[in-house]
Amino acid sequence: MSLFQRIFKIGQSEANALVDKLEDPIKLTEQGIRDLKKDLDNSLKALAEVKAIAIRSKRDMEENNNKARSYEAKAIQLLQSAKEGKMDSAEADRLATEALNRKEEVSRAATVNQENYTKLQTQIDSLNTNVEKIKSNIAKYENELKILKARAKVSSATKKLNKSMTNIDSNSTVSMLERMKDKVAEDEALADAYGEMALQSRSIDEEIDEALDSSSSAGSDALAELKAKLNK
């Protein structure tokens, strides 16, 4: 099963959330990796069990082959003993025949053991291939997960920065300065208005006094100028 098939299978416990919105890809990838690691554990366990059976089959095969050689050797010894007159020829033939029959039985068992061992080796090779593939996929997806997490951090930081820039743009310094200028101009105009109102509100006595002060000052200046001419 591929990682993506595995990821979509994960959603059984979170089906409602997946319907409403797209699930966090980092979370899904992490779950996919955990599932792959479970598969790896199961494959390693199966591989160990098959190897154990293969070892047993090989040992049984070797044991049966040794027994076959032993029965054949015993049959030869029986016939040799009869030939040398050490035992009855008919008895030797009977026992030698039994030994050869036993040899045939264990030889057939050894053949079965050999066939089983060969089949088990094929299964072992297949399991080894599967284990290595799962290991490779785990390493690959873990590396991709690291990259995905790094990209997520960059994306999050960029999103926050862009959001901040958007807020700055909508309430920009230029806009605030323009509003400030309008406010200052408004205050200045208001100050001028109050000034004009203050001038308009002077009493007639204040106007007379101001005129007299101006005339007196002008007369003093003229007198000083005349005295200066006489002294020349």
Image: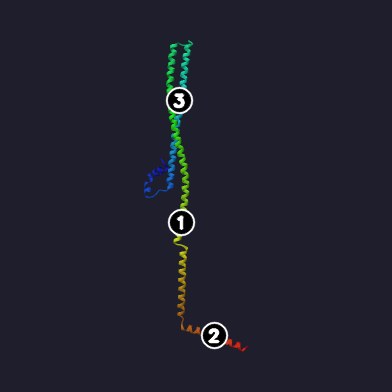
User: Which residue is at the far bottom?
Assistant: 230
Q: Residue at x 46, y 58 (%)?
A: 165
Question: x, y percentage for residue 160?
Answer: 46, 55
Residue 143, given in percent of the width and then of the height, sits at 48, 44
The numbered mark at residue 57 is: none
Q: Quadrant of the C terminus?
A: bottom right
Instruction: Give the residue displayed 45% in from the left and 33% down from the top.
Output: 125
Distance of label 3 from label 1 (alpha carbons): 73 Å
Q: Of helix, strand and loop, which one carries label 2?
A: helix
Which quarter of the figure is the N terminus placed in? top left
Alpha carbon separation for disc pair 1 and 2: 71 Å
Residue at image location 48% in from the left, 83% down from the top:
207
In the rendered structure, which amino acid carries the disc numbered 2?
Ala
> Which residue position is annotated with label 1?
162
Neighbor class of circle 2 (other Cα within 10 Å; few <14, some 14-19, many 20+) is: few
Name the residue tied to disc 3. Answer: 61
